[in-house]
Amino acid sequence: MKRRQLLATLSLITLSTSVLAGGLTTNTNYHIAFDRMMARGATFEIDAIYSNPAGLAFTEEGFTLSFNYQNPHQDRDITATFPLFTESADKTRKFAGKATAPFVPGLFAAYRKDKFAAGIMVGIVGSGGYVKYDEGLPMFTAPVTALLNSNLAQNPQLAAMGINVLNAGSLYSIDTELKGKQYVYGIQAVGAYQITDNFSAGLGIRYNIYDGFVRGHVVATMTSNKAELVNMQVDCDQKGGGWTPQISLDYRFEKLTLSARYEFNTKIETENETHKLSVGPETAAASMQKTGSASMLAAYADGAKTRQDLPALFSFAVGYEFLPNLRAMAEFHHFDDTHASMPGDRQEKLDRGTIEYLAGIEWDINKVFTVSTGGQRTDYGLTDDFQQNTSFACDSYSLGFGGAVNIGSHLRLNASYFFTVYSDYTRSSDNYMGTGLPCTETFSRTNKVFGVGIDYHF
């Protein structure tokens, strides 16, 4: 394996850290009512600002305010089997990642008078969290291990450093860590109008603010004298923004509600503010310059720009009121991921965009207590080439449940819990990261979210 193949992996670092519900890069759960019911596309309550903007025209007259808090936790683990991982007899090592978003708020405000309604929402509309791998990732550890175990004659770069690492598995140690943040904050304004007694339409606009960073290192040293064999460092902030236009329709007929909305593709171009981007020691850096490998780090150069689009979203929902105190909804989502630019044009490696099916039911036990439950199926259209250690996805099923308590005539308390069951994704390579050695990787995830919120109408 050549050093340039190892260093090229740095140019791929883009940690995707979504810990909320929705597509590859887009969140859909902002209000606790979603967490406890999942399907909310035909609602006429305050969360219609996002889920059914045209339906705001049928909400209760007056002002409504809502504050929501969610606390998600996710494990993002990669299990890799590589011939040079000697920690276990089966050559397998687990790289554990923890993704958290300690405080995920959602703020809503709506007003309706006669046939007109307007609303504002503030939330984390894309990605949303921190992820950390205390022991790095296979994409870094495996190539470094292969490099340091390969024959000296095949690695003139190491020979130039005066280091003989033939069969040197016990002669060096590797210290590696990678962490990242990725938030897309959104400020959305919508307006809706009752065209007839049964039909309404809505228009909206959202401004999205991208805020992320990637920080990590891979350092390999000789055990005997602590001499550096490899020292790669990256510390880069990324920021950008973009606009999302929206249109929506809602039709009511007695107990039946039909709704549809469309969010246009959001172009977001981030710009780097790079604090550190280096490869050492000096002999390694000089070798990289000679081979032209330095250009492979250009993606994280200070001032470099990268596309981080949010895809167009089409949603269609059906709601039905079986009884005055019993209602259900079903919903369909399609995220047009293949036409939303991603770093390295990864969108071209998907089979198709994300498809989601959602359903939920809600029951008013009495005038005080309401309970609900719902589920969601998410299918991403993944391929082996799309998956990366730093950004991978797994198809999933989610289940949510919870309830609401009416505290007087103006105040409602919502509480919810939902969890996601993911399908592991496994891929194999006969020449992993250019090492000439085989590797099998299994990507797995877990997810759980607890939330509470308050709605106030006046």
Image (spheres, rainbow, N blue to C red):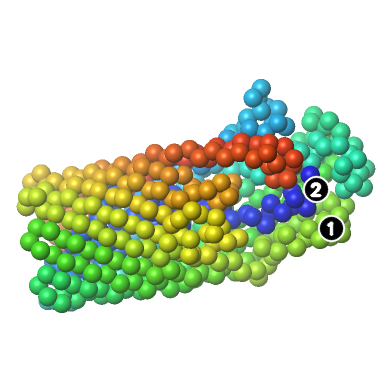
In the rendered image of this protein, does residue 416 appear above or below residue 191?
above
Q: Which mark is residue 445?
A: none
Residue 402 is at least partly visible in this image: no
Q: Name the residue under label 1.
A: 291
Task: Please name the residue shown 68% across and 42% down the image.
Answer: 432
| Residue 288: x %, y % from top left | 82, 56
Q: Where is residue 277 in the image (x, y as percent from the top left)?
A: 72, 59
- Compared across the picture, whether 133 is left or right of 203 comes to right
Residue count near mark 2 (Cα–Cα under 10 Å), binned few <14, some 14–19, many ≥20: some
Q: Which residue is drawn at 49% across and 70% down?
A: 267
Q: How many numbered discs, if any?
A: 2
Q: Residue 376: x, y in percent? A: 32, 47
Left or right, 349 with respect to 375, comes to right
Q: Which residue is located at x 12 percent, y 75 percent? A: 196
From what the image shows, is residue 84 above or below residue 211? above
- The reply to whether discs 1 and 2 touch (Cβ–Cβ < 8 Å) is yes
Residue farthest to the top? 89
Position of residue 145 in the picture relative to residue 445 (left or right): right
Q: In which quarter of the image is the N terminus?
A: top right
Q: Is residue 246 visible to us here? A: yes
Residue at the image point whose x is 30% and y is 63% from the top:
50
Could you tell me how far apart the alpha carbons at marks 1 and 2 are, in whole angstroms? 10 Å
Q: In this view, does 257 lie above or below 36?
A: below
Lower position in the chain sequence, tag 1 or tag 2: 2
Residue 452 appears left or right of 305: left
- What's under tag 1, amino acid-wise? Thr
Amino acid type, residue under disc 2 in the picture: Lys
Classify mark 1: helix, strand or loop: helix
Residue nearest the observer in this picture, 38 or 259: 259
Residue wearing tag 2: 2
